[in-house]
Amino acid sequence: MEFKKCSRCGNFYLSEGDICPKCNPKENCEISTFKSYIEENGISNSLENIAGATGISLKNLNRFLNFQEFENLKEQINNSDIINNQENNGIIFH
Ligand SMILES: [Zn+2]
């Protein structure tokens, strides 16, 4: 057995997964909130907007996007962020 560091609270714990037993219920709750947000609104908003709408921190959203089940979403978010940045900077060439 080895100690692991919880990705949410930073406490050390002894069990499976990236999250300590104390954070587990909150983690699962936020993941299902995130999923239902995506189902209703798609992924066209920036992570900042999603964080504001769901109450999930940017740090946790970024962590969720590294999960295998959200891999496709991550690509879509990155692409739309890139497009938004280009529009904001006025550097889109047609
Ligand atoms: Zn924790």
Image (tube, helix red, strand yellow):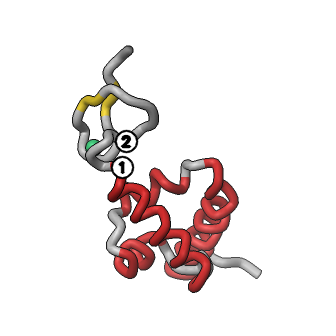
Mark 2, residue position: 19
x then y, percent, for residue 1: 38, 14
> Is 84 drawn above or below residue 73 in the view shown?
below
SS for dot 2: loop
Q: Are marks 2 and 1 in contact (CB under 8 Å)?
A: yes
Say few, some or many: other residues with alpha carbon within 10 Å of mark 2 (under 14 / 14 to 19 / 20 or more): many
Q: Residue furthest bottom?
A: 40
User: Is ligand 1 less than 8 Å from the beta carbon at label 2?
Assistant: yes
> Is 85 drawn above or below residue 67 in the view shown?
below
Q: Is residue 65 left or right of residue 59?
A: right
Say few, some or many: other residues with alpha carbon within 10 Å of mark 1 (under 14 / 14 to 19 / 20 or more): some
Instruction: Name the front one of labels 2 and 1.
Output: 1
User: Is ligand 1 less than 8 Å from the beta carbon at label 1?
Assistant: yes
SS for dot 1: helix
Amino acid of disc 1? Asn
What residue is rendered at 37% in x and 62% in y? 58
Earlier-in-chain disc, 2 versus 1 = 2
Of the numbered discs in the image, which one, if any, rests on residue 24?
Answer: 1
Amino acid of disc 2? Ile
x then y, percent, for residue 32: 49, 67
